Amino acid sequence: MHIGIDIDGVIANTFHLLVHELNAYFGVNHALEDIGDYDIYKVYGVSPEELKQFALSKENILISGPDIIPGADYYLKLLVSTYEVSLISARQEKYFHLTEQWMEKYNVPYHRLILWGQHDKREVCVHLGVNLFVEDS
């Protein structure tokens, strides 16, 4: 069996860091529970362009700064010992090295790391023969 697993929100606690950084950048104090809209710019009352500027200014910290989701490394070790595991992320290829460093920092095991650059990962999963994909959204 070949298992594909997303990184952000499944292994990396990116959302917690994202809200912290958004609060600091825009000078507000939203709690995680306040974020009920997928279009996060609406929650912060900013334009999509302002959110894009935020993301560009914080991209390295958002890639290399999240904590690991508790237990993720343990369960990945169990899966990797029995199944082929590919980490498939919407992150852009330019973050490959930072992503690898993050995986090493938290001792995250995997067989293959793919930064797909798109949120829809169906095509790459079909191409790789992934039987099961774990996604947070």
Image (cartoon, helix red, strand yellow):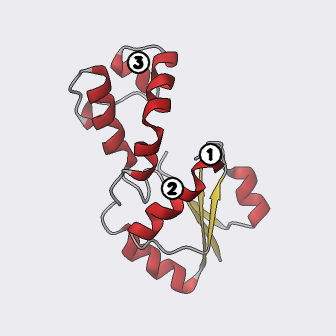
x then y, percent, for residue 73: 39, 72
x then y, percent, for residue 80: 53, 80
Q: Amino acid at mark 2?
A: Leu
Q: Nearer the viewer, residue 127 or 101?
A: 101
Q: Earlier in the sequence, mark 1 or mark 3?
A: 3
Residue 117: quarter of image: top right
Residue at the location (35% across, 60% down)?
A: 68
Residue 6 in sight here: no
Is label 1 in contact with label 3 (beta carbons under 8 Å)? Answer: no
Residue occupied by mark 2: 98
Q: Quadrant of the N terminus?
A: bottom right
Query: SS for tag 2?
Result: helix
Q: Amino acid at mark 1?
A: Gln
> Callout 1: 10 Å neighbours few (<14), some, many (20+)?
few
Numbered mark located on residue 42 in the image = 3
x then y, percent, for residue 137: 49, 45
Residue occupied by mark 1: 92
Residue 61: quarter of image: top left
